[in-house]
Every structure is written in C-alpha cells, then in structure tokens.
Image (tube, grey):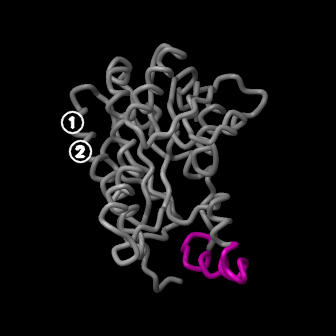
Amino acid sequence: MDLHLKDKVIIVTGGARGIGKAIVQTLTEEGARVAIVDKLVQASKTLPDRNEKGKFFHADLTSEAACKEVIEDIVREFGALDGLVNNAGFNDSIGLEQGSPARFIESLTNNAGHYYYMAHYALPQLKKRRGSIVNIGSKTSVTGQGNTSGYVAAKGAILSLTREWAVELLPYAIRVNAVIPAEVATPLYESWLQSFTDPQEKLKQVSKKIPLEHRLTKPEEIADAVAFLLSDRSSHTTGQWFFVDGGYTHLDRAIN
C-alpha cells in the first residue's frame, strides 16, 4: 500500500535507536524526508548509506529553548513540516517511596515536557500542511508498573494530551493519535534483560505473557503503525490510542 509519504517532512524525536530508529527507517523507506532529533550524536548514522532524505539534528529536548531552536533549524533546512513523531523519553524509575517531589517534577518535564514544546513550536508549520502528530506512549500509563511514578504520570499525560490536541486542532484538520507499545525488542530492553541472572529465562517468562505468538513486539511493528497514522491512509482517524502489543495490555490473562 502506498502511504503517500513521499517527500513529506517528518520529525522523529529520539530517532537514534530502538523504536525511534525503526520509525526513521520505515519513513525513509516510504520516501519521507526525516528530521532525526536526538541528543545522541552517533544518530547521524541512523539512516542507511543509500538514503539521503534524512538529516540529523542534535538537541537535548529537556530544554524548551532547544526545542524551539531545533524546530527553526528543521524548517530552515527543509522549508516545511508535515508531521511530528514525539518519541523521546526514558523510564527513570522515580517512584513514590524511592523518589522525591523534586525528582518527580523533573521526570514529568523530561518525559512529557518536550512533547508539548515540540508540538507548540511545530504547530504553525503543521497548520500550513494539514499535518499530523503521533505520540508514542507506554502501556505502563494504563496498567501501572511500580516504582515509576514520574514516567507513568508523564505517559498518562501524553495520552490525555493526544485527545486534547485532537480536539483543539480540529479546525486545522491536524490529526493527533498515539501508539502504545508494551514489551518491545529494543537494545534498551535487551540491556534490561541482561540485568537478570538468566536473561533467556526472563525473556521466556515475559514472552509467555504476550498472547499473540508469545513473543516481544518488533520495533518495526510499532513503526508501521506510526507510518500509517501519519499518512492520509488514516485521514479520518484522530484522538485514538493504538495498542501495538500482541494483546498484552487488554486480553484476558487466563488465555496464557
């Protein structure tokens, strides 16, 4: 299916690795011109050598000023903006007991602040092109996880903002949706598995709980959903939360 993304200018935050990198690769394969925004400098090598449609922009998105500046740089480079994928963030394990009020607020800012900053400063350009926003969430925002108050609160806010922005931006025909992963086979997830005495046994335990095929979700499967939601193939879809998780979040645990 042609997603009609050829030459569309799309920002992907956190595009250096994991889910973000998979999104970048899928979008470039669809012919989009991708602005990769990340604080990891090595992200400049994220795109395949054969592809010259992407460009790397180094920025620490925890700063509002940095978000404003990188949007300006992207528009200066590409001349327009058709889509924004808010993906950057990390689980910093700031809990209720093992945390502090100051660190909680910091976690909210680090994980949700830049979603707002980037959307706010991108909005004038998105209005011109009837663009689209896709926010990457987390299943923890609807299930809880334990010892992750900051991250979970931020991801919950992101889901609420998805609905709020979808309403606010209706007059401009700007669609806003969220994709919600659960257990995804990324390098970061592999690092987490390696923290256990028997990583393979832990992987089997987790995989067994995922109803569809008893396996982790592939980053590419998240990327495919994101590409679809950015495209005009989903032209009448807005304010939705898409769970790409093999049924992990919602299907009856008894089936496992």
Amino acid found under the numbered disc labelled 1:
Glu
Q: Residue at x 57, y 40 (%)?
A: 39
| x and y percentages locating residue 225 in the rendered image | 51, 47
Residue furthest bottom as drawn: 254
Quadrant of the image occupied by residue 72: top left
In the depicted view, which residue is nearer to us: 172 or 14? 14
Q: Above or below — where is 246 with respect to 26?
A: below
Which residue is denoted by mark 2 in the rendering? Answer: 164
Residue at point 45%, 49% (across, down)? 136
Mark 2 falls on what kind of element? Answer: helix
- The answer to whether the residue labelled 2 contacts the one labelled 1, judged by CB atoms less than 8 Å apart, is yes
- Disc 2 residue type (three-letter): Glu
Q: Which residues are magenta?
A: 194-213
Numbered marks: total: 2
Q: Secondary structure at mark 1?
A: helix
Q: Position of residue 197 (x, y in %)?
A: 71, 83
Horizontal side of 216 relative to 132 (left or right) equals right
Residue 149 relative to residue 191: left or right: left
Quarter of the image containing the N terminus? top right
Q: Position of residue 65 (x, y in %)?
A: 39, 31
Quarter occupied by residue 205: bottom right
Q: Tell me how far mark 2 sits from mark 1, CA to CA.
A: 6 Å
The residue wearing badge 1 is 168
Q: Report the residue at 55% width, 51% height from top.
A: 222
